[in-house]
């Protein structure tokens, strides 16, 4: 999908967040985009004194002049731009003043694009816990859709001038709509695995209510955070800032070169999206040939009998455009850390525990295929004394991710909490202690908001909305999920605290730790329910609902503040953005639930723990379920040897944080393992995901090193299109399953183990 330390080329929490929580917008591309910002800031822009806004010069570094007297250009790969390339007219009217930035077309297109990302995140999140923000995707795809339509359609059908501020409205609606699906890759399936709910179709009303109470609290709370973090603190917010400059560059079409570049970006993202969607759909009918390459199974059929054991441990290749692209965006550090964890877990410790009689597998077909085993089951009649390797690996993996992430947050505490007094003052609208204001405080208080009064969000609107959403959360929690009012209040207070931590961290480092630190809410709520002496069913329901409220609401607040930063740079109206976020959230509630029901209907294993789930690893679901069980059951359901391994690896991962910060030079920190990604390798048994990511990371590393301008221009567009395309391809495949037209009915099992369909 967090809780993860920054890595080369960006390792977002949302990408490596096993909690199913999305990091700050599309944080996976943050470091790459920061390089773009570095060029814009240092070499191609001037800065207003005392401001975080940069004035882009006319020519962005997307095309490089061959010489100062030549008007020819080269592209990012060093090749001359083809002058026969079909281009827009040589001259274009001066940009108009945008009279209307909050439009129906912008909100609808943004919300739909947000749901495209949301659908992709359900698909990818259930597989590995990765997720991607909708901000940059919405900005680029929104431009690609609305720019042509604005010129060919009449005004009454949605045509008319389309500028950067309206483009900002699109990405605001996209972020709000796309951020609500994270519930359905973590806490919600965990509730079904624990037997706390019936079926998604029967529970649709409750799912709508749960999504609603987590959607608006964070949105309203983001409004007062804007003044402090954006106007006074002037935090960078790397990805939202990069989104703003991307929007500026897309609309900067004053020269033929800029128009050519914008048109090429549209074609790249569109072509990659269509290719990935089509390939995923077609490959579902021929999975053993086009998608999964079971090399060791094939070798076992050719006479190398022992190779079947390697296939049993999940070692094969998968041609997945989404995870190859995820590796390209995450970089070598995150990808290799993920693969290193998988190698240690599923290539070394797993086989060793089976050999020593600590864990146990199940024979699949001993008569036909001796040695073909299933080690991936999560159920067992005695999980403590006869666990499966997958269940055994869960505890070290989750422990490593939690310890590493909490240590990162604790280590950053001086950065995160230096100005609690000022923050409270900002919320109250007055100094907390008048006599104690420092010169810095006076400077902050004197700073004026650049947005005009009519563009400001009325105080009564966000305060009334915050009060109403808080009361709604308590009422829904009580009557829909039997959650005590006291627990509901605690969950809202935790969301309040997590919002501060998340916005500060995201604005400074582009890493949103809310997903992991929300686990603290489960620990707090677990302590409350134990003192109340609640029965197991109610205690577990309360734990998951309260944790969802705290984590999702805070994560949504972080996303919304990031959007407001994008609008601040572009000079967009905060009020228009706020209304776009409201509309996007409202539409996202309905469509998110429908998407989850669709996936759950096509793949019953998502909600039924007793059904083997080869299509989805569901690491975030496992993490939420395991923490819930640990804090509510009288006896910890952890095998002793697994617990000891978890303690050792947890200590090592925690020590890594101060060692890296104090002893490792900055230039060498890329070699220090990312332990969140490492732990994910234990939790996700599908080893072909980190393999695909490592391949993608090396492709990007070569591309960026050999043709850096080319990577900066096209890298994200290509990767975003491939990721979104595969996600929507997963939605199409789910529809085919429901209609009975999927590869399991009409596809081929050629190349699959045991000639059993493996799509």
Image (cartoon, rainbow, N blue to C red):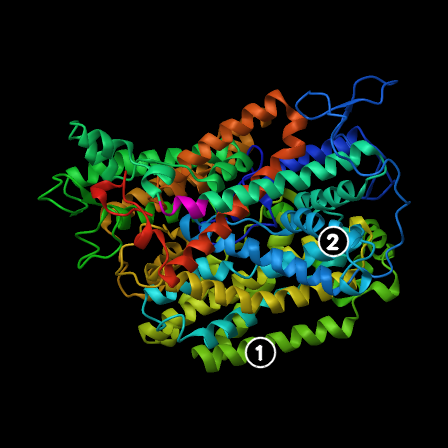
User: Is 756 on the left-hand or right-hand side of 363?
Assistant: right
Residue 460 picture location, percent across and down: 76, 75
Q: Is residue 549 above or below residue 741?
A: below
For the record, the magenta segment spans: 280-285
**Mark 1: few, some, or many residues within 10 Å (few <14, many ≥20)?**
some
Q: Disc 1 marks which residue?
A: 472
Height in image: 532 above or below 369? below
Element at label 1: helix
In the rendered structure, does residue 742 fall within the stretch colored magenta? no
Q: Nearer the viewer, mark 1 or mark 2?
A: 2
Q: Position of residue 114 (x, y in %)?
A: 60, 57
Between 533 and 584, the one nearer to me in the picture: 584
Q: Is residue 741 above or below residue 536?
A: above
Disc 2 element:
helix
The mark found on residue 149 in the picture is 2
Secondary structure, magenta segment, majority class: helix
Q: Residue at x 19, y 46 (%)?
A: 359
Residue at the image position 20 percent from the left and 35 percent from the top? 309
Percent position of residue 159, x then y: 79, 58
Point out the tag, 1 or 2, that comes first from the N-terminus. Answer: 2
């Amino acid at each position: 999908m967090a809780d993860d330390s920054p890595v080369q080329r960006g390792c977002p929490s949302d990408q490596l967040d096993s909690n199913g929580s999305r990091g700050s917008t599309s944080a996976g591309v943050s470091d790459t985009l920061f390089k773009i910002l570095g060029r814009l800031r240092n070499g191609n822009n001037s800065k207003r004194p005392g401001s975080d806004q940069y004035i882009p010069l006319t020519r962005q570094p997307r095309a490089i002049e061959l010489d100062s007297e030549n008007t020819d250009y080269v592209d990012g790969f060093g090749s001359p731009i083809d002058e026969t390339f079909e281009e827009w007219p040589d001259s274009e009217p001066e940009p108009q003043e945008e009279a209307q930035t909050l439009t129906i077309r912008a909100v609808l297109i943004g919300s739909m694009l947000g749901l495209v990302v949301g659908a992709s995140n359900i698909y990818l999140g259930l597989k590995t816990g990765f997720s991607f923000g909708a901000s940059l995707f919405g900005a680029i795809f929104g431009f690609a859709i609305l720019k042509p339509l604005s010129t060919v359609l009449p005004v009454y059908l949605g045509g008319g001038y389309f500028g950067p501020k309206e483009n900002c409205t699109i990405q605001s609606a996209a972020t709000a709509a796309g951020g609500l699906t994270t519930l359905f890759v973590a806490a919600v399936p965990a509730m079904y695995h624990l037997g706390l709910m019936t079926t998604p179709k029967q529970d649709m009303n409750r799912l709508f209510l749960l999504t609603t109470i987590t959607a608006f609290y964070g949105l309203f709370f983001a409004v007062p955070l804007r003044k402090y973090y954006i106007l006074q603190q002037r935090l960078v917010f790397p990805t939202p800032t990069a989104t703003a400059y991307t929007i500026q560059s897309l609309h900067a079409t004053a020269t033929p070169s800029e128009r050519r570049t914008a048109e090429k970006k549209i074609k790249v993202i569109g072509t990659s999206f269509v290719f990935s969607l089509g390939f995923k759909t077609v490959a579902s009918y021929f999975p053993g040939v086009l998608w999964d390459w079971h090399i060791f199974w094939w070798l076992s059929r050719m006479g190398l009998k022992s190779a079947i054991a390697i296939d049993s441990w999940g070692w094969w290749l998968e041609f997945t455009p989404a995870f190859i692209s995820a590796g390209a965006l995450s970089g070598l550090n995150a990808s290799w850390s993920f693969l290193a964890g998988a190698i240690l877990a599923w290539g070394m410790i797993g086989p060793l525990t089976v050999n020593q009689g600590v864990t146990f597998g199940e024979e699949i077909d001993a008569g036909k295929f001796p040695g073909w085993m299933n080690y991936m089951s999560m159920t067992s009649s005695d999980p403590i004394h006869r666990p499966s390797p997958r269940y055994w690996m869960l505890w070290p993996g989750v422990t490593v991710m939690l310890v590493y992430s909490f240590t990162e947050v604790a280590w950053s505490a001086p950065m995160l909490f230096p100005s609690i007094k000022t923050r409270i003052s900002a919320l109250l609208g007055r100094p907390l202690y008048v006599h104690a204001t420092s010169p810095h405080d006076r400077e902050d208080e004197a700073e004026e908001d650049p947005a005009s009064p009519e563009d400001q969000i009325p105080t009564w609107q966000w305060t009334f909305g915050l009060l109403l959403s808080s009361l709604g959360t308590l009422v829904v929690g009580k009557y829909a999920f039997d959650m005590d009012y006291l627990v509901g209040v605690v969950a809202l207070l935790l969301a309040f605290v997590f919002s501060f931590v998340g916005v500060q961290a995201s604005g400074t480092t582009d890493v949103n730790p809310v997903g992991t630190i929300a686990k603290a809410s489960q620990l707090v709520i677990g302590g409350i329910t134990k003192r109340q002496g609640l029965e197991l069913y109610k205690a577990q329901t309360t734990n998951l609902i309260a944790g969802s409220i705290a984590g999702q609401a805070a994560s949504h607040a972080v996303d919304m503040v990031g959007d407001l930063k994008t609008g601040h740079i572009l000079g967009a109206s905060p009020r228009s953005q706020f209304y776009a976020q409201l509309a996007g959230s409202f539409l996202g509630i309905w469509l998110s639930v429908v998407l989850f029901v669709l996936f759950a209907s096509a793949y019953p294993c998502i909600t039924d723990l007793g059904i083997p789930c080869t299509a989805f690893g569901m690491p975030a679901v496992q993490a939420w379920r395991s923490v819930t069980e640990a804090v509510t059951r009288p006896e910890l359901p952890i095998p002793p040897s697994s617990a000891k391994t978890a303690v050792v690896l947890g200590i090592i991962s925690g020590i890594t944080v101060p060692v890296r910060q104090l002893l490792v030079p900055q230039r060498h920190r890329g070699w220090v393992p990312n332990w969140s990604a490492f732990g994910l390798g234990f939790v996700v048994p599908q080893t072909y995901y980190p393999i695909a990511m490592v391949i993608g990371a090396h492709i990007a590393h070569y591309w960026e090193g050999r043709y850096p301008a080319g990577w900066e221009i096209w890298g994200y567009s290509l990767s975003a299109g491939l990721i979104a395309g595969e996600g929507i391809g997963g939605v199409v495949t789910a529809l085919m399953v429901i209609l009975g037209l999927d590869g399991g009915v009409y596809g081929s099992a050629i190349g699959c183990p045991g000639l059993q369909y493996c799509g």
